[in-house]
Image (cartoon, grey):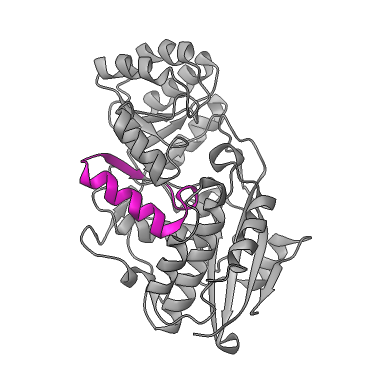
Amino acid sequence: MHIEKVNIYPTNMPFQGDFPHSRRNALVAQNLVAEVIADKGRVVGYGEGAPRMYVTGETQEKAVKSAAGLIAEELFPWDLVDVSQIWAFVDRLSGEKSINTAVCCIEMALLDALSKAQGKSMMEYFPGDFCGDKVFYGATVPLASRERVAEVCKIIDGLKIKKLRLKMGVSYEKNREIVQVVKEFFGDHCDLRIDANGAWDFSLAVKHLALIRDYDIKVVEQPLMPGDPKIIDLAKNTDRYGITLMADESACTLREVQKIMDEGFYKMVNVRLSKCGGFRNSLRIIDTLRRSGYAFQIGCQLGESGVLSAAGRILCLLCKDAKYYDGSYDKFLLKENVTEEFVSFGLGGQASALDGLGLGVKVNIDSLKRLSAPFGPVSLRRP
């Protein structure tokens, strides 16, 4: 496969409703989409990244620049004949989280293009040892008003989804209200997790312990900021009550995950493609967790288009041993998409592999261009 050009589109994905959390309250998700054009335009592959400053320190602007820098690397595989070239390219990169979104985006576009050129699904490039034929997604409840939370619960109940993640903020009273509304709606027939996105300090986290126990909340995700030394004391409290702490923003790279495992305060890790630097890096993290018997979930970034949702579907299906699955929410969250179809799921959150070559989705180039306006793409041609 002879790559002639790569376009990088900064995209603004508009939300169809209010879906805030403690670190984000925006009307659009600022992502980037890479377009790999090869073999005189006969092959086109797409990849997406979702830069979030509070996660990896990347803004959209920085991620676009990083992606352009990756393409300018001497070892970028302009002549691509085997997937091993993509893995070798990714393996030679720094491994720093400051470029993870860009790595995810470019790696995905290369994989999509190569698998289309070779007439296969992207799934075929990965080991099938832990592969399943179905995935059951959970649902997320936003940090919002009582009325909005009840509205979201009604939608979730209609989908018959019982694994719920509740976004928490810095107001104990507000958080208690959200938990109470959800419990009023679902009773004891749900598996509850809460996610503070690192917004709590130690005293606020301890204040929530009684609420967590009383409402049988199973998992607390990223309660404190990454690097907060008070996680040691918090873990002692949560261990006493059988509450699992899950790392998210603290676990963006293999090095960070290895540190988490060595310390032992977090007992679970949230693996997300964009946050962790794409398939190669995410699967390396997952393999490391598996070898040590560490629990993990497959997560997503708020505001993913159908491109990243499709990639997330592949990662979920490769990990039948994950504890939870989040993703494929573009139908419910976005007003517009860059793909022809939304990537979604059925009752119970059930979904299976997408049909077709590559990622299994078709990008609408007109929508992509419109959602990247007024900026347009950064284009890099074959040297």
Relative height, residue 9 to residue 180 (above, below): below
Left or right placement of residue 10 versus residue 184 in this view: right
Q: Residue 252 appears in which quarter of the rendering?
A: top left
Q: Is residue 103 visible?
A: yes
Q: Residue at x 71, y 66 (%)?
A: 378
- The x and y percentages for residue 244 are 30, 27
Q: Residue at x 38, y 36 (%)?
A: 164
Left or right placement of residue 321 versus residue 210 in this view: left
Q: Residue furthest right?
A: 374
Question: Count the marks: how many?
Answer: 0
Q: Residue at x 31, y 66 (%)?
A: 126
- The x and y percentages for residue 203 are 47, 10
Residue 302 covered by magenta stretch:
no
Magenta-colored segment: predominant secondary structure: helix
Relative height, residue 138 to residue 238 (above, below): below
The front one of 272 and 83 is 83
- Which residues are drawn in magenta? 272-297
Q: Is residue 306 visible?
A: no
- The x and y percentages for residue 7 are 65, 70
Q: Quadrant of the C terminus?
A: bottom right
- The x and y percentages for residue 35 are 59, 71
Residue 276 covered by magenta stretch:
yes
Q: Residue at x 34, y 39 (%)?
A: 258
